Image: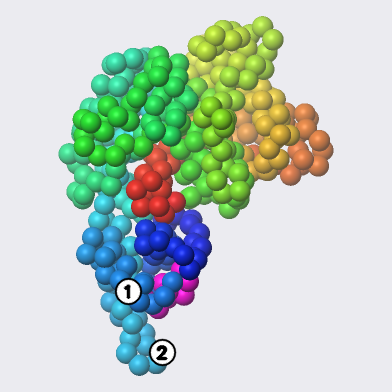
């Protein structure tokens, strides 16, 4: 599984940018000669040869043998050495299990770590996060590229969790603390934004999409024109705190009737466990989700919406109910254009997403 990447070259590119372009080409297509890489990137053959030599020395690229010769001597083919670096990835979005994984540069999961996580908050939640990271690092067979974490809540680009009501974290500089402890670059993302990165890189064919992440809360990640949209306060996509009932249950954020109080995975599963009809529970949640999404679609004109949540019961029924509700509340032409579906990437969506985040920040290839 390889990242979907794009490359653009210019005459004034710096060495760092040129290196990124060659890496992008290797991510996009294994088994390319130096001449192929020069054509793909628009760089001079001598520049490509020098950059490839560096990447071979670093172990990021590898020689795959010689290809068939059209004229003259066969060319040496090059590829990404996906095994040369590992990324430690952590998913804090599950309401009951803390998940971590060791992932290689091609997105393959090498090792998994899981610990019970239900109801853990504050310092205890952060301490458990440190434990799974340490366990994953001990299992990593290659040099670490970095550590990526997906968490519910509002997260700044420097890794400060502005607010995560599920964990009672407020203004917590998680990235600096973990960087100091483990000595590796730590990248942190809102879990729904991480899910959107994964869907964009590994799943969706659209450059404009919205990924709804349903776990301990409800949030969404937004990609517009191939770029993530975070908003002025880094809180774009917090649809779980849109009020869908005037006088509903109180939300951890302080408001009443928020989507999250009706549609989070724990709420849905608790209602079913209490004896309510599963189909009715999911249909009601889907109607409220569609109500929240209708406004987002009307503002953003996004046609591709993916729903992710491995704890969610009857995901197809949830999506069908949400789509019907959305279409009933949007302009006919706009609503008909929307494709709303469950994610095909399964339970590893956030883990894959934070691996993409680390790749983007450390190698510039996502």
Which residue does the numbered mark 2 point to in the structure image? Answer: 70
Mark 2 residue element = loop
Q: Residue furthest front?
A: 12
- Image quarter in which the N terminus is found: bottom left
Secondary structure of residue under mark 1: helix
Q: Main secondary structure of the magenta part?
A: helix
Circle 1 packing at 10 Å, graded few (<14), some (14-19), many (20+), is: some
Residue 232 pos. (x, y %): 56, 30
Give residue 49's mark: 1
Q: Decide: few, some or many residues near mark 2? Use Cα within 10 Å; few <14, some 14-19, many ≥20.
A: few
Closer to us: 143 or 277? 143
User: Is 201 or 38 nearer to us in this picture?
Assistant: 38
- Where in the figure is residue 193, as x and y percent of width and height? 49, 36
Vertical placement of 221 versus 116: above or below? below
* Colour approach in the figure: rainbow
**The furthest residue to the left:** 138
Q: Residue at x 61, y 30 (%)?
A: 318
The image quarter in which residue 180 lies: top left
Q: Tell me if 226 is positioned left or right of 25 in this view.
A: right
Report the Cα–Cα distance between label 2 and label 1: 20 Å
Q: Which residues are magenta?
A: 33-42
- Name which residue lies at 29% across and 43% down: 146
Q: Is residue 41 magenta?
A: yes
Sequence-first tag of 2 and 1:
1
């Amino acid at each position: 599984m390889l990242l979907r990447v794009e490359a653009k070259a210019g005459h004034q590119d710096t060495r760092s940018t040129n290196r990124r372009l060659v890496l992008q080409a290797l991510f996009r297509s294994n088994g390319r000669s130096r001449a192929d890489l020069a054509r793909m990137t628009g760089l001079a053959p001598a520049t490509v040869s020098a950059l490839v030599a560096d990447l071979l020395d670093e172990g990021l690229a590898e020689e795959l043998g010689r290809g068939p010769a059209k004229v003259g001597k066969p060319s040496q083919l090059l590829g990404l050495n996906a095994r040369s670096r590992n990324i430690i990835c952590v998913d804090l979005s599950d309401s009951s299990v803390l998940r971590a994984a060791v992932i290689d540069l091609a997105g393959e999961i090498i090792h998994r770590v899981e610990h019970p996580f239900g109801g853990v908050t504050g310092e205890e939640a952060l301490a458990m996060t440190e434990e799974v990271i340490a366990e994953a690092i001990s299992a990593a067979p290659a040099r670490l590229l970095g550590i990526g974490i997906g968490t519910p809540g509002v997260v700044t680009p420097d890794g400060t969790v502005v607010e995560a009501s599920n964990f009672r974290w407020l203004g917590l500089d998680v990235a600096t603390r973990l960087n100091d402890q483990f000595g590796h670059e730590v990248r942190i993302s809102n879990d729904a934004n991480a899910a959107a990165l994964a869907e964009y890189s590994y799943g969706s064919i659209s450059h404009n999409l919205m990924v709804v992440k349903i776990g301990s809360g409800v949030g969404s990640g937004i990609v517009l024109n191939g770029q993530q949209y975070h908003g002025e306060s880094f809180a774009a996509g917090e649809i779980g705190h849109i009020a869908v009932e005037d006088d509903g249950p109180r939300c951890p954020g302080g408001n009443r009737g928020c989507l999250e109080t009706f549609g989070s995975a724990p709420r849905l599963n608790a209602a079913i466990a209490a004896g309510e009809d599963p189909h009715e529970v999911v249909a009601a949640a889907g109607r409220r989700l569609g109500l929240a999404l209708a406004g987002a679609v009307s503002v953003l004109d996004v046609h591709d919406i993916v729903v992710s949540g491995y704890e969610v019961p009857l995901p197809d029924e949830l999506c069908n109910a949400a789509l019907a509700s959305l279409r009933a509340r949007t302009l006919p032409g706009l609503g008909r254009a929307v494709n709303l579906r469950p994610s095909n990437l399964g339970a590893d969506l956030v883990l894959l997403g934070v691996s993409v985040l680390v790749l983007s920040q450390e190698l510039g290839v996502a």
